[in-house]
Amino acid sequence: MGGMDVMFRVEQPTVRFGETFVASESFKMLFREGMTLVEETAAYLDGPGRDESRLLARHAALTYASESMRLTTRLMQIASWLLVQRAVSEGELSLSEAAEEKTRVRLSATEPNETAPVLVAELPLSLQALIAQSKRLHARILHLDKLISDDRPTPEPRVSPVFAQHDMLRVAFG
């Protein structure tokens, strides 16, 4: 049995995903995509969507109303999350302050009482497209939010008492 091969880890500062992501070009593109979707949806719901909803049968009009409210709520959550992250990237908020804001802006992972696809299929195609885009963007943001949340500093590893004793023996018997 030869000498023990002990590998030591070189201490380097940990790179935090949240800090690097919000300062990246990818985040800027995501921000623009999200805010553009908010603007497009608002323009649609205030204009052509209003006209299209008047042409729907009663049951489809009710689906239109509930789905447009869900869409608006989802987009408000997305916009709030994006604005908080942009505040972090611009130095207006720290990551810990952003985490506190997160308690006020909840990104819900599931929607209660999801509308049956058969009913959604009766909605105008423009609204269906906006709903689908918002759901895809929401899923991406939920994933990013989890990555950022999971990227908290980890506690320093404790030194194993066995390794401490082994080190003392190695020093003593060199």
Image (cartoon, rainbow, N blue to C red):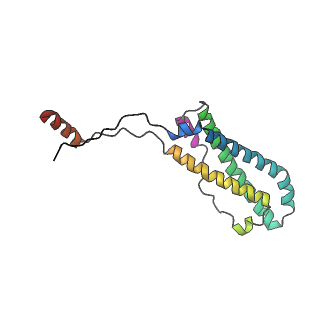
Q: Main secondary structure of the magenta part?
A: helix
* Quarter holding residue 154: top left
Left or right, residue 81 beside residue 163: right
Residues 124 and 74: in front is 124
Picture layout, residue 147 above or below residue 128: above
* Quarter holding residue 19: top right
Instruction: Indicate whether residue 71 is drawn in magenta.
Output: no
Give the image location of residue 47, x and y in percent: 85, 51
Left or right, residue 11 beside residue 104: left
Find the magenta span and give its range: 95-102
Give the image location of residue 159, x and y in percent: 28, 39
Please tell me which residue is depicted at 79% across the width and 57% down the height of the picture.
126
Left or right, residue 163 beside residue 47: left
* Residue 65 in view: no
Picture layout, residue 114 above or below residue 4: below
Residues 105 and 167: in front is 167
Please tell me which residue is depicted at 65% across the width and 44% down the height of the picture.
30
